[in-house]
Image (cartoon, grey):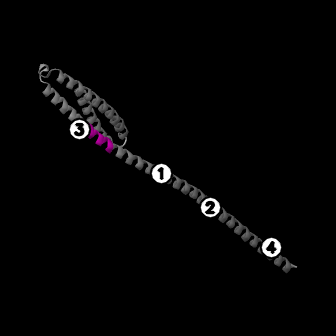
Amino acid sequence: EYMDSNKYIEHLVTQLEEQRWNLWRRVLEKLSVARLQREVAQSKSEGAMREKLIHELEEERHLRLESEKRLREVTLESERSRAQMRGLQEQFSRMEETVRNLLQSQGSPGQHGEGTVNIMKVYQEKLSEDSRRCKEGMEKIRTLADEDSRSESSSTEEEKEKTKLLLERLKALE
């Protein structure tokens, strides 16, 4: 009986140790599962973050392409404005030359009589019409220069100065 009790105790101790090892294995398995779940959750959150970053990059790329397109349009419009400004300057120079020639040919009013007065009226009307067109062109250039000021601030200052000088010349011609 004593031997049977010892065997029975040994058997119980062995079972207890097996249960303890099983318990430890389950605890370790649960810890491993929890760690894997955290890793999966982190991976999912990184995936979501990655998707968000990709979306933001696509938006930035789209905005950059639109900005570059607008910059090209503004640059072309600026070139057109500069060409128009050169044309207006040439037109002003021709008008100034016409006025100088008229003043030189006018001399004293009694020399040429009524023919000179009629010629002066015609030239004055033409000059008024040309100056009106120039003013409209200058207003358009001023509007375009304001638009260009967003992208080309240094050249806009030059354009404004040229516009100011042209307006002064126009006032002097009038």
In this rendering, position of residue 79 left or right of residue 52: left
Q: Nearer the viewer, residue 98 or 71?
A: 98
Residue 127 on image: x %, y %: 25, 29
In terms of sequence position, does the residue under pointer 2 or pointer 4 come before the other?
4
The amino acid pointed to by label 2 is Val
Q: In this view, does 55 lie above or below 35?
A: above
In this rendering, position of residue 143 left or right of residue 6: left
The disc placed on residue 40 is 2
Q: Which of 94 and 41 is in front in this view?
A: 94
In terms of sequence position, does the residue under pointer 1 or pointer 4 come before the other?
4
Residue 158 visible (yes or no)? no
| Helix, strand or loop: magenta stretch | helix
For discs 4 and 3, the disc positioned in front in the rendered view: 3
Quote the CA–CA distance across marks 1 and 2: 33 Å
In terms of sequence position, does the residue under pointer 3 or pointer 2 come before the other?
2
Residue 45 on image: x %, y %: 59, 56
Quote the CA–CA distance across marks 3 and 2: 74 Å
Judged from the image, the secondary structure of the residue bearing numbered disc 1 is helix
Mark 1, other Cα within 10 Å: few <14 / some 14–19 / many ≥20: few
Question: Do the numbered discs 3 and 1 sit on residues whose CB atoms are within 8 Å?
Answer: no
Residue interval drawn in magenta: 79-89
